[in-house]
Image (cartoon, grey):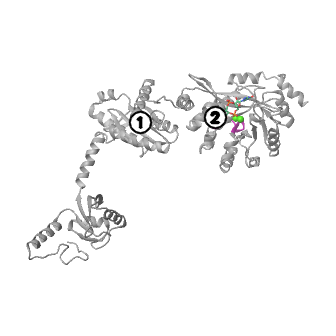
Amino acid sequence: MASIKGAPEGGIIAPLRQSPQTAAASVAEGMVDECPEPILRLSPDGVILFANAAAGHVLRHWRVASGETVPAPWRDVLAGLMAEKNSTTAVEIECEGKLYDLRLQAVHSPGHVNVWGQDVTEVRRAESEARRIVHHDSLTGLPNRNLFLDRLEQIVRQARRAKVMAAVHLVDLDYFKEVNDTIGHATGDELLKAVAERLRRIVRDTDTIARLGADEFAVIQGDLKESEGADTLAQKILDGFKKPLPVNGRDLDASVTVGVSLYPYDGEDPQQILRNADLALFHAKSDSRGGYRFFVSKMNETVQRRRAIEQDLRVALERQEFALYYQPKLSLKTCHIGGMESLIRWRHPEHGFLSPAEFIPVAERSRLIVPIGEWALFEACRRARAWQDSGMAKMKVEVNLSAVQFREKTLVETIKWVLDAIELEPECLELEITETVAMSDIEDTVQVFKNLADLGVSLSIDDFGTGYSSLSYLKRFPVKRIKIDKAFVSDIGTEHNPGAIARAVTTLGHSFGMEITAEGVETEQQLSFLLDIGCDEVQGYLFSRPLNSDDFRSFVDTFDQTQPAVAAVLRRQR
Ligand code: C2E
Ligand code: CA
Ligand code: CA
C-alpha cells in the first residue's frame, strides 16, 4: 500500500483488530489494495491521501507520489467538484499506453474526493476498430462513403466560417470493368489498391481521399482560395495516372476521368455537392475519357468562361491552334519598315479568333504561358529566318515576354537554345517586357536584362507610362527601346491629351540613348505630333494592322512610299 500523509499508521482505515467491525475493516482494506483497478483519495486541495497498488499508472501520469499534490489543472477540477453538492465527474487519461476512465466523487463531509479508475484500453481499441470497419473500405483502407460524407460536412463547415471554397473531385477509373474481366478479380483488387496508393501520393496529406464505389474514388480539397486551385489538382490527378501502376509485379496502364464540384457554387450540403460532382463526371466521361470537367453551375459567367478557356488552352498547343501575326513598324528616320512585332492569335475551334487580351492572363495564372510563350518565340524566330532565307531584307522581330516567362530561371537558356536551333543572329531578335514587369523586382530585372544583353538580343520596355514608375530607373537597364503605350498616343492633339507624357518620355529616353516607338498610331494628327517631338518609330493601324505571315510578306514587298501616311512623313522631313 502506498504511504498516506497524516493517516494513522497501517492505512487510512484504522486497524482495530479486536472487534468484528475491525475485522470487516481489515478485509475492506485488503480488498481496496488488491483491487486491480486504481482507487485513490485526494484532499480538496489535491494532496494524495491514499492510493492503492493499481493506482501506480495514474500517479505516474500526474508525475506525483503519494502525499504530494496533483498538477494545477486537476486542482481546478477538484475545486469545481467541491463547490457543488454530491457532484461527480469522469475524465479519461492516457498513460504508458493505457487508457483509464477516472470517476471523481466529491465527499463534502468531512471533505475529500474519491477517485475510481477503470482500465478501458481494450474497450476503446475495440471501439475504434469497430469504427474503422464501419468507416473504412476494407480493400484499400481508405475512408468509405459514410466517413467521406462526415468529413465533407466538417470541411464545408470550416469553409463557411473561413469564407473559402472547397472542391470534391470524383475520380473514376476508366474501363475498369473490361480490365477486371481480362485480368481477373484478384488482380483487379490489386489494381484498386494501386489506384488508392497513387492517389495518396498525388494529393496533400491534409486532403481526404475516399473510395465511394467499386472503381470510384473521391478527393476533398479544403481551404481553397481560388477556383483555379481545383483545376490544378484535377490536372495533377490526371497527370499522376500517366505513369503505369505497379500491380503484382507488372506495370498496368490506367487512366482516370475526373468530375469536380465546388462549395459554395455547386451546393451547400455534402449530398448536393457530391451529386453535382457525379453529374460533372458523367459529362466528362461523355466528352472523352481521361479528362476532367467542372459542374456547370450558377458560378458567375466570367469565372466560367475563364475556366473553359483554361481547359481549352491546355490542348490548344498540340492541336496547333495558335498563329502569330506581325505588325510592321515604320521608322520615321528612314521611312522604311524597321521591323515588326509578333502578336499571338488563337484560332479557337468554337469561338473563332480570340484576342491575346482574353487568354494571356488565363495562361499566365495557370503558367501555361511558359510553353505557349516558348512556341511564340520559336515560331517568330523561325519565321524571321525563313524570310531572310527567301531574300527579304533583314529586320528585327519583336517578341512579347510575359511576367511569368521573364522570371523563369531557364529563360536565358531557352532563348539561346532557340537562336542556336534556328541559326538566327541574336541582333534579329528583340524582347519586349512591360514596364510593370520590369519594375516589379528591379534587382532581378537588372540581372536578367544583363544576361539577355550578353546573348546579343535587344530589349525594349513595353507599355511605357502605364506603370507610373520613376523614369530614372530606366538608366539602370541595358535597354534599346521604349514603347509608349497607346493610351498616351490615342487622344494626342485633342484637349484631353496635350501629349505631355509622350514628349517627356521621348526626351528622357533619348537622353539615355534609347529609341522611342509610339504604339497605336491611328491618325495623321498623331503622326504629325510624334514627328514634332522627335519620336523614332511608329506602329499602328494608320500604316497597318497586325498581318498574317503571308500578308506581312506582301506588305513588305509592295511597300510604297507614296502611301498617303508615308508620303506625309516624307513631306515633313523635307
Ligand atoms: P501589346 O504588346 O501592347 O501589343 C500591342 C497591341 O496593340 C496589339 O494588340 C495590337 O494589335 C494593338 N494595336 C496595334 N496598333 C493599334 C492601333 O493603331 N490601335 C489600336 N487600338 N490597337 C493597336 P493584341 O494583338 O490584341 O495584343 C494584346 C496584348 O497581348 C499585347 O499588347 C501583348 O501584351 C499581349 N500579347 C500578344 N502576343 C503575345 C505573345 O506572343 N506573348 C505574350 N506574352 N503576350 C502577347
Ligand atoms: Ca508588345
Ligand atoms: Ca504595348
Say which amino acid is labelled 2: Leu
Q: Which of labels 1 and 2 is toward the front?
A: 1
Residue 269 numbered tag: 1
User: Does residue 284 appear to the left or right of 119 in the view shown?
Assistant: right
Q: Please give the range of residues in magenta.
A: 419-432
Task: Name the spot of residue 83 as percent of width and height, x first.
Answer: 33, 64
Q: Quadrant of residue 79?
A: bottom left
- Counting from the top left corner in percent of width and height, residue 456 is at 70, 42
- The answer to whether residue 271 is above or below residue 443 is above
Q: Residue at x 17, y 72 (%)?
A: 13
Q: Quadrant of residue 179?
A: top left
Compared to 154, does 119 lie above or below?
below
Q: Quadrant of ligand 2?
A: top right
Residue 503, percent from left and from top: 82, 39
Could you say which is closer to the camera, residue 385 or residue 568? 568
Question: Does the magenta portion include 303?
Answer: no
Q: Give the mark nearer the N terminus: 1 vs 2.
A: 1
Across and down, in percent, residue 451 comes to: 67, 46
Whether residue 144 can be seen here: no
User: Dot 1 lies on which element?
Assistant: loop
Q: Secondary structure at mark 2?
A: helix
Q: Note whether 266 is above or below 47 in the view shown.
A: above
Q: Is residue 458 above or below residue 353?
A: below
Q: Which residue is mark 2?
A: 377
